[in-house]
Image: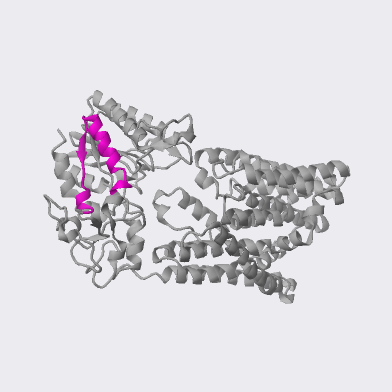
């Protein structure tokens, strides 16, 4: 079953089209781990009356750490050599967190952090599942010991009460998995609390072994074969669009549990006739090492050569068998079976602690290898940014043309992802999965004029300039923003399905605006398409549907005497400008891009068309001060223009404040 699990994962990571639900292999591993660990602990408990925590943790340390730390250290070296400088800091943190087995929580936090979208795929992302298992290994023996101590005092048999304790743990975990998968699926995938029931399923099989051994052979064989079929079926019926883990994970989890449960009594009638062939047994033995090696090889290959074709990705997966076997043969097994490690749990734990420390040091060294963003040429005064451009007509201003070198760059490209509005830290931006309406106030809180800023992150990027304008003019600025969610009556798509959370949020925001009665609604967005027919996702998305939805939304507000102004979306570079600038500080022209194409790929044209069709909204376009020429420069007036995607750095937005102020002062009553 380990071979089945790892093959599913490897094929999925190489090309999801081959096995759409291959990630269920991880769930198979969870059940197997729960079964093996619980069986080991219960046997020791029944034989000796207790469990030696030192021996247990020593066995885990010598089994897992030598191979995993080898991968972490070599991945840190390869990342330093191969990945862009802007990714080395987060990857180094991931490596350190992986060495301490809490990287799953770090990834869960990143998965719901919209600002982290610019971070590349981590070469140690796959360690999240190992972290879940290690957290289980840390707590499960203590749980068993606690129940054993109680049953010993009460004169009760241990197994039945361990089963009760297991149910007490598993049912809340499963319920939480279902709930969290519906409300916060991105984080639900990684956290331990939504996966504990899967390990508990395997543990339950281990506790039931005495009864399972007495099952009729034919029934046991049918159960085991049905379980294997369920696992294989899940790999093809589950897709990335399936809410996961949640209730859907029951199929591979129950299937794996059935294979193990039935296999005890099925003997040669069961799946062992297939799973026991030498090839699968060999792959199963290598499964841990294969799991460790294949992912960083895929990720680092893409970092070096760009997107891999299916054939290339399969080639990398096949190549991972080489270091996997070498590590298994010369590191994993020799360390695990070393005499000193076997004889002395204390020595094994000491070696394990030092290995973990080596992994942490490797990760922190990768972080430290990133050059400091502060340079000796940093200007004493704030750089001018857009202020170097002609205020009346910035178009084709020579100060906005791309050049190879500038005296300084603010923010430093390495720090660009952190040059974001404080509104994110203030909790003003609603997450992708949430329908909550969060509001924040800026500008003059006692101002007699109220401006409502509504839209997605492309709207929120202007908040620092609006805050300054509001304080200067005595305007109160109230925000209503949600990640990737345009302020429109149209239905947006998400993963091929209607973006229901966005629709609900939109409706709720309209109700809030009716109550607020702002003097102006200012909106912008990054999306330029909406679903043509929400009832038929196959109908696709179009600009027309978005235009129609925007006009309806703005007209509804105008009919209630709530004025609307629309701020043009910023040009879409099509790549991370800050990442390019970090790599080409003395050849910044490598990071320039075509203005016409960038504007065409943005939502600017759709917004302008909707404004024209509406005829009742004000149109503000500052893009000539963002990209004055036919080729857009990454740095203007010593200020880096872009951070993640097509978002402007806060520093550059602040230099655009006089232009935005002048436009708004002509509109606000």
Q: Is residue 421 visible?
A: no
Q: Nearer the viewer, residue 546 or 515?
A: 546
Residue found at x 79% / y 53%: 274
Where does the image place residue 276, in percent across and percent down from the top left? 79, 57
Residue found at x 74% / y 46%: 228
Residue found at x 59% / y 57%: 131
Scheme of colours in the image: one colour
Where does the image place residue 235, in percent across and percent down from the top left? 64, 46
626 inside magenta stretch: yes
322 to 528, vertically: above or below: below
> Which of the 4 image quadrants contains residue 521?
top left
Q: How many marks?
A: 0
In the picture, the quarter occupied by the N terminus is bottom right
Q: Nearer the viewer, residue 8 or 34?
A: 8
Q: Nearer the viewer, residue 117 or 192?
A: 117
In the picture, the quarter occupied by the C terminus is top left
Most extreme residue toward the top is 559
> Which of the 4 image quadrants contains residue 417?
bottom left
> Which of the 4 image quadrants contains residue 533?
top left
Where does the image place residue 251, in percent across and percent down from the top left? 67, 41
Where does the image place residue 345, in percent across and percent down from the top left? 70, 69
Magenta residues?
Answer: 599-627
140 inside magenta stretch: no
Residue found at x 21% / y 44%: 621
Q: Nearer the viewer, residue 124 or 136?
A: 124
Does 1 sit left or right of 85 as displayed? right
Does 53 sit left or right of 608 as displayed? right
Q: Is residue 51 visible?
A: yes
């Amino acid at each position: 079953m380990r071979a089945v699990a790892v093959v599913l994962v490897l094929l999925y990571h190489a090309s999801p089209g081959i096995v759409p639900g291959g990630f269920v292999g991880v769930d198979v591993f969870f059940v197997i781990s729960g079964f093996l660990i619980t069986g080991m602990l219960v046997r020791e408990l029944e034989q000796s009356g207790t469990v030696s925590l030192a021996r247990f943790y020593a066995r885990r340390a010598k089994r897992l750490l030598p191979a995993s730390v080898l991968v972490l250290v070599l991945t840190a070296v390869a990342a330093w050599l191969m990945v862009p400088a802007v990714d080395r800091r987060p990857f180094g943190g991931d490596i350190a967190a992986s060495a301490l087995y809490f990287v799953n929580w770090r990834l869960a936090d990143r998965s719901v952090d919209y600002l982290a979208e610019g971070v590349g795929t981590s070469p140690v992302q796959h360690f999240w599942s190992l972290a879940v298992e290690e957290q289980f290994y840390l707590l499960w023996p203590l749980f068993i010991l606690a129940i054993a101590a109680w049953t010993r005092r009460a004169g009760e048999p241990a197994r039945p009460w361990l089963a009760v304790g297991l149910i007490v743990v598993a049912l809340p975990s499963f319920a939480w998995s279902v709930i969290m998968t519906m409300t916060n699926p991105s984080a639900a995938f990684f956290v331990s609390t939504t996966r504990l029931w899967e390990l508990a399923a395997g543990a339950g099989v281990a506790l039931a072994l005495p009864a399972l051994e007495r099952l009729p052979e034919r029934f046991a064989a049918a159960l085991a074969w049905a379980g294997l079929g369920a696992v294989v079926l899940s790999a093809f019926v589950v897709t990335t669009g399936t809410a996961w883990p949640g209730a859907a994970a029951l199929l591979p989890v129950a299937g794996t549990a059935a294979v193990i449960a039935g296999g005890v009594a099925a003997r040669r009638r069961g799946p062992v006739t297939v799973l026991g062939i030498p090839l699968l047994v060999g792959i199963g033995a290598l499964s841990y090492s294969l799991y460790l090696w294949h992912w960083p090889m895929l990720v680092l290959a893409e970092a070096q050569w760009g997107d891999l074709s299916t054939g290339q990705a399969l080639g990398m997966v096949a190549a991972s068998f080489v270091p996997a076997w070498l590590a298994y043969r010369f590191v994993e097994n020799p360390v695990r079976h070393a005499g000193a490690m076997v004889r002395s749990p204390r020595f094994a734990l000491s070696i394990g602690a030092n290995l973990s420390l080596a992994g942490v040091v490797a990760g922190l060294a990768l972080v430290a290898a990133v050059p400091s963003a502060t340079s000796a040429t940093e200007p004493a005064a704030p750089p001018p940014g857009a202020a170097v451009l002609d205020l009346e007509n910035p178009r084709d201003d020579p100060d906005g043309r791309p050049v190879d070198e500038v005296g300084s760059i603010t923010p430093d490209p390495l720090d660009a992802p952190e040059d974001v509005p404080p509104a994110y830290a203030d909790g003003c931006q609603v997450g992708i999965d949430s329908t909550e309406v969060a509001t924040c106030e800026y500008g003059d809180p006692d101002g007699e004029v109220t401006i409502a800023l509504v839209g997605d992150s492309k709207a929120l990027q202007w908040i620092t300039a609006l805050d300054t304008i509001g304080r200067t003019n005595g305007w109160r600025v109230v925000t209503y923003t949600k990640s990737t969610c345009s302020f429109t009556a149209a239905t947006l798509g998400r993963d091929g399905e209607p973006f229901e959370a966005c629709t609900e949020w939109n409706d709720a925001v309209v109700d809030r605006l009716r109550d607020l009665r702002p003097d102006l609604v200012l909106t912008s967005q990054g999306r330029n398409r909406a679903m043509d027919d929400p009832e038929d996702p196959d109908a696709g998305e179009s600009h027309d549907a978005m235009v129609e939805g925007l006009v309806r939304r703005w007209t509804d507000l105008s009919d209630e005497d709530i004025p609307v102004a629309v701020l043009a979306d910023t040009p879409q570079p099509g790549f991370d400008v800050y990442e390019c600038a970090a790599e080409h500080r003395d050849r910044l022209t490598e990071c320039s891009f075509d203005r016409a194409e960038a504007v065409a790929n943005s939502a600017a044209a759709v917004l302008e068309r909707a404004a024209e069709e509406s005829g009742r909204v004000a149109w503000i376009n500052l893009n000539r001060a963002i990209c004055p020429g036919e080729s857009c420069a990454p740095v203007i007036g010593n200020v880096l223009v872009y951070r993640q995607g097509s978002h402007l750095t806060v520093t550059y937005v602040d230099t655009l404040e006089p232009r935005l102020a002048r436009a708004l002062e002509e509109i606000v009553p």
